[in-house]
Image (cartoon, rainbow, N blue to C red):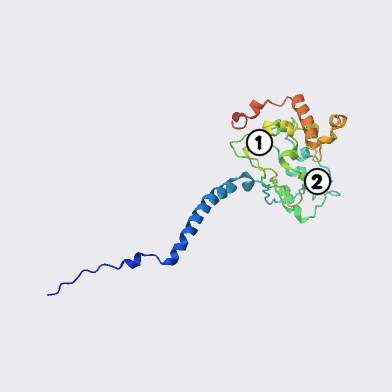
Amino acid sequence: MNTPTETTPSSSKFVFPRWANYLLPLVLLGGLGAGMYVPVLVGLGLNPNTLNKNYRPKQPVPYSHSLHVGQLGLDCTYCHTTVTETGFAAIPPVETCIACHNPEKEGSGVKKDSPKLAALHAAYRSGKPVKWVKVHDLADYAYFNHSAHVTKGVGCSTCHGRVDRMGEEGVHQHANLSMGWCIDCHRAPEKNLRPPSEVTNMAYTPLDDPEVIAANITNLKEAQLLVGRRVKAEYNVHNAAYMQSCSTCHR
């Protein structure tokens, strides 16, 4: 009597075809590439320049700083009235704009029929403020005081850029506002300080300073350091220990 013989499955189905050998170096190279790609991707993705810098939201009214500040010479403090006295920069109320753009007052009302001012006029009639979109938005855990900087000689353009050149497309965030960016200035504030009387002057240059001219300095960096050190001493800017203390900005 014949007994059935046990058959073993062919081992050939567990053998990769010959062409699969060429995949191994590709897999190894891919693994090494991913090891370098992932940190770079995460680093760039979380970089403040990637997240915030050049942020430009669409505003309800296409207000042109290049027209009002750059061409008409409107001073920053005309609209942002609190920067020299309080920690925040006030957004102008509707009445500030209506002083020039009143659609109802006879014989006045600059561009009062412009459709670009529809949201402004609607807010004026309703008694509600224009819903401006905040551009420079620091994290809640970071304390920043506008008056402490403006009255010590930090110019508006140092943080906000040449706002006088930003048109109807809206204001954009000039700097990344990261902690490292702030600390760099706090370590050596003289690199950015100017006479407080010039903080709203967008075209300011230390080369025009009388002391710089008298010293016959033509190098911009040297001129800035001369002016910055003078302003730092004259207006009693805090020492490096206070300026770099965690509790100064994180209270």
Residue located 64% across and 26% down the image: 242
Please tell me the numbered disc located at residue 38. none
Closest to the observer: 73 or 244? 244
Q: Which residue is mark 1?
A: 182
> Which residue was labeled with disc 2?
68
| Residue 87 position by quadrant | top right
Residue 78 location in percent, x, y? 78, 39
Position of 166 compared to 215: left or right? Answer: left
In the image, residue 118 above or below residue 160: below
Q: Quadrant of residue 8?
A: bottom left
Mark 1, other Cα within 10 Å: few <14 / some 14–19 / many ≥20: some
Q: Is residue 164 above or below residue 28?
A: above
Quadrant of the image for the C terminus? top right
Q: Amino acid at mark 1?
A: Cys
Residue visible at 60% across and 45% down? 47
Q: Helix, strand or loop at disc 1? A: helix
